[in-house]
Every structure is written in C-alpha cells, then in structure tokens.
Image (cartoon, rainbow, N blue to C red):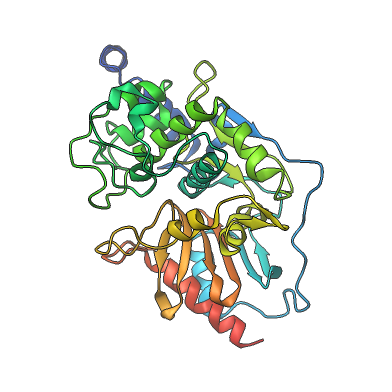
C-alpha cells in the first residue's frame, strides 16, 4: 500500500507539473471550484470562489410596484413540476410594469444574488449602445482594430461582436477542460486569451454564438470609455434605473481585474428584469432616454434572415405567435420580454431543460406556455 501511495503521489505531482508547464494549470482551479464543492459544472452561487468587481447601486432605488392581484393566481401544475425538477430558485411575472407573480425556493429570496451566466451578454451589448450614445464609439460599424491592433486588417466591427458574427476561432465547448471556454472561465489572464484569437471566417456574414465575441466587446468598451466596465455599468444603468442593490461581476484575478463581460454578474431576479423593461420601452427609463431607440430597435430583431433567433446581444422567439426578446444563461437563466403584452418573465435556477434542434431548450417554451395559462386564469 505504501508503494502504491508513493507511486500514485508521484504520478499526481507529475501531472500537476505538466499542467503548469503546458499552461493548463487553470484546470486545477476548475477542479477546486467545481468538483471539490460537490458540483459537476459551473453553478449559480460560484461567484464566492472568484474575485469580483462591484457594480454600485445608487441611493434612490426604484422597487417594482406590486400588481393589484399580486400572487393571487397559483402556478399551473406543469409550471410547478418543471420548476421543481430543474431547481428553479426565482420565478417572476411582471405585468404592466408591476409584480404580478413572484416565487422563490430553497431559501433564496428577492435579494439573493446568483450568477447571470450569459444574460450578461445582453447587458454588455446594452453598454455598447450606451458607449455609442455617449460618443465613445462611433457606431456598430466601427472596426475593432481601432481599439486593438491585433485585429488590424480583419474588417471585424463592434457590431459583429454584438451580433455573434465575428468569424473568430473560438471553440464554444462546455465539456472539455482544455477548451478556450474553460480557460476563459478559470484562467488568470483573460486578455491574453482573447487577444490571441484569430479571425478565420469573414466577419459580418453569418451567426455563430461565441462567448469570446462578447468578451472582446467588453474589452473594447473599457478601452473606448477608459472606465472599468462595472463602473460604467453602474453609472449608465444601475443608478439611473434604480437598481435595488449592488451586484458583483467576476474578474479573471486580483492582478488583471478584467471582468468576464460574456457572463457572470451576480444579481437578483427583480433587478435583472429591468433590462427587459428598458428595451421594451425603447431605451427610455423614467422619462430619460438612456439608449438610442434606433439601437434598441435594431438589437431585438434578427440581423441575419437565416438566423432569426438572434439580434444584437439578445435571443429572439416567436413562440405562441408572441414576439419576444430574451436574455439567456446556460443553466436556464431567463429574462423573457413580450412587449405586445407588457409582460416580463424571469426565471433563475440550477438547471435547464433538454437541448434539441430548436433555438431554445424545452423549458423555455414551457415557461411561456404556462405563464400565458396563468394569466388567462386571472
């Protein structure tokens, strides 16, 4: 047994050394954060294991008013079943700018902060619109090379990044620990990873969902504004829109402090919903035009006819013949906005439904169907 332990220990040390030599030592952090905490993948409370930047809130919060029939309608049996099966921790229905239904589970509540995952892509795209409105960026057609010479001659634009049509050589793999996606989540120098990417397909020609697009977009916005992204987000939206509490945004490490703009804002369901209202109201909030209405309009319609599921930073759907735009995270985080019915649905939780050939996993369609059944019961 002693010989076996010595042999096993030697192999383990050799493997760890090899990870450091080959620059894959970030895998050790992934193992520590995920597997040694009892998980098998990234999870909604993992922000406590990372360095975070703070998105400050203002001193004048604007709570959502409660609807006159707040929580008077019970969830349908099917909605209750899927929420239990997939570990939903927050489910909100906002109707006519008021909380119509609200439910939390597993000890989570209105102020609980969980990982947005890729819902942050929509927020980063909103910051692009704000940077254009503020004059830091000339428009969606401005070349990325104006900010990073590494992309000189690529004809890549900031709009290509927001609309997921960059042509970058990014592998959007969530299973391989050796993928660039895993490296970006756990490594300590995110800029080095992103600026080593190459444009291998013609930008602006077709949709291809890549997290690296939004990470590079966040870096462009920081460079254009000369402001930390969390601070710019706070002054642009968190404060003027009356967010009820500060949020946290994961950074790569304490030294580089580059936010993961493609993911990882720890916030609450009520506050995430505000972006649905902002875009539904054409970029206006409380009488003030925070985003140009033309930018908002362009964001929530398809850029490419052959890819009707995506605009600029937002997923799109016409399920139930209802045009909706959607903020979406990998574990079934959703802010679903249906402007024609003045309706916003927020779902946060541990898991999503099965993937299929459709643009969304099955849970998305179930949430929409059951919410409309609930509203019909009112």
- Left or right: 10 as drawn, with respect to 226: left
- Quick one: 287 or 361, which is closer to the camera? 287
At horizontal 49% and vertical 71% (from top left) the residue drawn is 367
Which residue appears farthest toward the right when viewing the image?
59
- Residue 308 visible in the current orientation: yes
Would residue 10 be visible to someone looking at this image? no
Position of residue 215 relative to residue 150, above or below, is below
Residue 100 coordinates in the image, percent (x, y): 69, 72
Q: Residue at x 57, y 66 (%)?
A: 345
Q: Classify the position of the N terminus by image quarter.
A: top left
In the displayed structure, 119 sits above or below 196; it is below
How many tags in the picture? 0
For the residue pair 22 and 358, the one nearer the viewer reads as: 358
Counting from the top left corner in percent of width and height, residue 62 is at 77, 54
Where is residue 40 shown, x and y percent of the image? 40, 42
Query: In the rendered image, which quarter is residue 233 located in?
Result: top right
Q: Is residue 154 left or right of residue 193?
A: left
- Locate the C terminus and report the quarter of the image it occupies: bottom right
Of the pair 14 and 137, the residue shown nearer to us: 137
Query: Residue 161 sits in which quadrant?
Result: top left
Q: Note whether 196 is above or below 319 in the view shown.
A: above
Q: Describe residue 69's horizontal placement relative to residue 74 as left or right.
A: right
Residue 227: horizontal and vertical position, in percent? 58, 27
Q: Image quarter for residue 109? A: bottom right
Which residue: 41% across, 20% down? 189
Above or below residue 112? Residue 213 is: above
Among all residues in the image, which is located at the extreme bottom?
Answer: 377
């Amino acid at each position: 047994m002693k010989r076996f332990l010595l042999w096993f220990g030697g192999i383990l040390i050799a493997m760890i050394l090899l990870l450091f030599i080959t620059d894959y030592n970030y895998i050790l952090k992934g193992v520590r954060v995920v597997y040694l905490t009892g998980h098998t993948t990234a999870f909604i409370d993992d922000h406590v294991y990372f360095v975070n930047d703070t998105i400050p809130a203002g001193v004048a919060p604007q709570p959502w008013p409660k609807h006159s029939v707040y929580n008077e309608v019970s969830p349908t049996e099917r909605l209750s079943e899927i929420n239990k099966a997939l570990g939903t921790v927050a489910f909100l229905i906002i109707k006519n700018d008021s909380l119509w239904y609200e439910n939390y589970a597993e000890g989570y509540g209105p102020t609980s902060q969980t990982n947005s995952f890729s819902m942050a892509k929509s927020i980063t795209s909103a910051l692009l619109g704000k940077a254009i409105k503020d004059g830091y960026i000339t428009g969606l057609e401005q070349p990325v090379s104006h900010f990073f010479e590494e992309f000189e001659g690529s004809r890549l634009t900031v709009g290509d990044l927001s609309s997921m049509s960059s042509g970058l050589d990014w592998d959007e793999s969530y299973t391989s620990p050796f993928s660039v996606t895993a490296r970006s989540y756990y490594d300590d120098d995110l800029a080095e990873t992103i600026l080593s990417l190459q444009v291998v397909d013609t930008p602006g020609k077709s949709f291809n969902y890549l997290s690296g697009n939004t990470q590079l977009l966040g870096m462009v916005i920081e460079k254009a504004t000369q402001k930390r992204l969390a601070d710019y987000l706070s002054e642009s939206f968190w404060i003027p829109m009356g967010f009820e509490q500060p949020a946290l945004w994961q950074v790569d490490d304490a030294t580089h402090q580059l936010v993961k703009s493609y993911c990882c804002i720890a916030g609450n369901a009520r506050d995430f919903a505000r972006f649905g209202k902002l875009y539904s109201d054409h970029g206006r909030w409380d009488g003030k035009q925070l985003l140009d209405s033309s930018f908002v309009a362009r964001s929530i319609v398809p850029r490419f006819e052959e890819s009707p599921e995506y605009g600029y930073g937002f997923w799109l759907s016409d399920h139930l013949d209802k045009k909706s735009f959607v903020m979406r995270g990998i574990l079934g985080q959703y802010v679903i906005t249906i402007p024609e019915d003045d309706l916003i649905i927020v779902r946060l939780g541990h898991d999503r439904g099965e993937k299929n050939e459709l643009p969304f996993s099955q849970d998305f369609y179930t949430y929409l169907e059951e919410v409309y059944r609930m509203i019909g019961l009112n």
